[in-house]
């Protein structure tokens, strides 16, 4: 969701949300010990052009391949091999906002130069503000960030919309696909709940199998209720974690990969009023980095794969120098050496060196994002480019990433994309 300076109205208007919290006691370095049915009418992503017809997805349990147990993440992962030729880029927006898009934007990027070119739109998807791809690369999923929230599946081969399922809540703002490829996880911001949907062999979604509302602990300072902002799987695949801005809590669940049901196993509290927004794991699997939207801080978290327990460390600086700023999202390089943070308000990308095998972040500085209000960051699969979706300027900035120093260099003029809130390079 947007910060208090830019919260969307349900019909494209904008409202304000009060924030409580101040940046205090920030250190440049912190470490903690390791614990024991719509229609698509645009050019298809994989074809030159032409309309495609949406269809309703079947209900019932998944019929795809049997799940495979993800192995433990390697301590350091090598980036993917550099691709050749243009690669697909998918863009999220708000269709109900003034000046917003008309659906999921289709584009391509050059993995060498970083240049982006537009290719059309997949229409028939309402307010697709966050996007995720299936592990097999054949299906794209989008939230429908509306009062009657939904999640939509789109077949990438021809841009066909496979159907939409209700999330059972309001204002879904994040989704992710479980590593088995059989379950879609989504977070409902307005209603403070998380949902699970089965994924069938075609990539379409079945009826919801789980819906959990964060009723405890009570809302934090300045909050009217729970606000689930992210739902993601741990690197070891053993747990799924939900970040809730409203309750200042990260909830850990165990997902039953046979039935799609959730069982709570642990909770991690942040400082009251911190407003946790987004959690990103180090590839080693024992640490994660948490962006606090409300009090403009970040924290290193220790993660215990055996229990799913997260331990939130001390607050540190976002590099915003104390101005009005709402940190949005971390990304970490595949080799685990550098982390980047989107700063909305300061309009920058903060650069961190990752040290002590993931246990420590050291702020290296900030780089202007060449846009306004960077809502989301994404690294290209080979790690050579960083994409920033700038909501207020309606642009996507692309940076070359120096693999040795972690330095960022702007790759030409930002690409114009209406109310750009998500960029997903494949």
Image: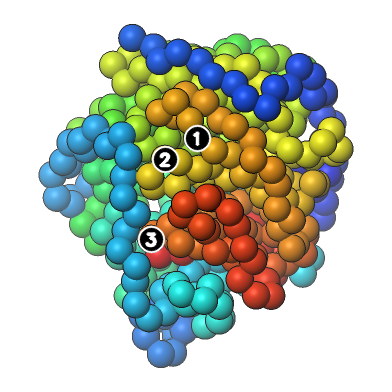
**Viewer-proximal residue, 85 or 404?**
404
Nearest to viewer (mark 3 / mark 1): 1
SS of the residue under disc 2: loop
Name the residue rendered at 42%, 40% in the picture.
336
Question: From where the camera sits, is residue 15 visible?
Answer: yes
Q: Position of residue 226 (x, y in %)?
A: 64, 25
Q: In which quarter of the image is the N terminus?
A: top right
According to the image, label 2 marks what residue? 336
Display coloring:
rainbow
- The total number of labels drawn is 3
Mark 2 to mark 1 CA distance (whole Å): 7 Å
Tell me which label, 3 or 2, sits earlier in the chain: 2
SS of the residue under disc 3: loop
Q: How crowded is mark 1: few (under 14 residues within 10 Å), some or many (20 or more)?
A: some
Q: In which quarter of the image is the C terminus?
A: bottom left
According to the image, label 1 marks what residue? 354
Name the residue rendered at 55%, 77% in the picture.
116
Q: Where is residue 56 in the image (x, y as percent from the top left)?
A: 37, 63
Question: From where the camera sits, is residue 57 visible?
Answer: no
Q: Position of residue 78 (x, y in %)?
A: 31, 50
According to the image, label 3 marks what residue? 382
């Amino acid at each position: 969701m947007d910060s208090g300076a830019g919260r969307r109205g349900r019909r494209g208007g904008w409202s304000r949300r009060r924030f409580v919290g101040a940046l205090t006691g920030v250190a440049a370095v912190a470490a903690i010990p390791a614990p024991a049915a719509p229609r698509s009418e645009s050019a298809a992503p994989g074809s030159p052009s032409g309309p495609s017809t949406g269809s309703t997805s079947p209900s019932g349990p998944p019929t795809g391949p049997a799940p495979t147990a993800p192995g433990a993440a390697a301590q350091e992962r090598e980036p993917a091999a550099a691709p050749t030729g243009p690669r697909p880029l998918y863009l999220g927006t708000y269709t109900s906002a003034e000046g917003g898009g008309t659906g999921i934007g289709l584009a391509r990027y050059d993995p060498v130069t970083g240049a982006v070119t537009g290719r059309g739109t997949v229409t028939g998807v309402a307010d697709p503000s966050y996007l995720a791809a299936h592990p097999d690369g054949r299906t794209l999923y989008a939230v429908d960030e509306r009062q009657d929230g939904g999640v939509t599946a789109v077949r990438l081969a021809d841009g066909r919309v496979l159907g939409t399922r209700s999330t059972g809540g309001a204002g879904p703002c994040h989704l992710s696909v479980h590593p088995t490829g059989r379950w879609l996880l989504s977070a409902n911001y307005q209603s403070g709940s998380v949902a699970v949907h089965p994924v069938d062999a075609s990539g379409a979604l079945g009826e919801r199998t789980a819906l959990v509302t964060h009723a405890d602990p009570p809302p934090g300072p300045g909050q009217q209720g729970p606000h689930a902002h992210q739902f993601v799987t741990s690197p070891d695949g053993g747990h799924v974690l939900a970040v809730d801005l409203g309750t200042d809590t990260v909830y850990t669940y165990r997902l039953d990969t046979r039935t799609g049901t959730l069982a709570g196993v642990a909770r991690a509290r942040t400082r009251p009023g911190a407003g946790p927004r987004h959690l990103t794991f180090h590839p080693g699997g024992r640490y994660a980095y948490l962006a606090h939207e409300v009090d403009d801080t970040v924290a290193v978290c220790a993660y215990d794969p055996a229990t799913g327990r997260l331990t939130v460390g001390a607050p540190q600086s976002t590099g915003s120098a104390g101005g009005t700023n709402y940190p949005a999202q971390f990304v970490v390089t595949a080799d685990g050496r550098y982390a980047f943070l989107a700063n909305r308000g300061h309009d920058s990308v903060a650069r961190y060196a990752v040290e002590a095998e993931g246990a420590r972040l050291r702020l290296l500085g900030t780089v202007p994002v060449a846009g306004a209000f960077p809502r989301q960051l994404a690294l290209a699969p080979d790690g050579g480019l960083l994409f920033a979706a700038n909501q207020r300027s309606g642009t996507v900035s692309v940076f070359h990433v120096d693999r040795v120093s972690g330095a960022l260099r702007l790759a030409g003029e930002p690409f114009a994309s209406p109310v750009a809130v998500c960029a997903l390079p494949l």
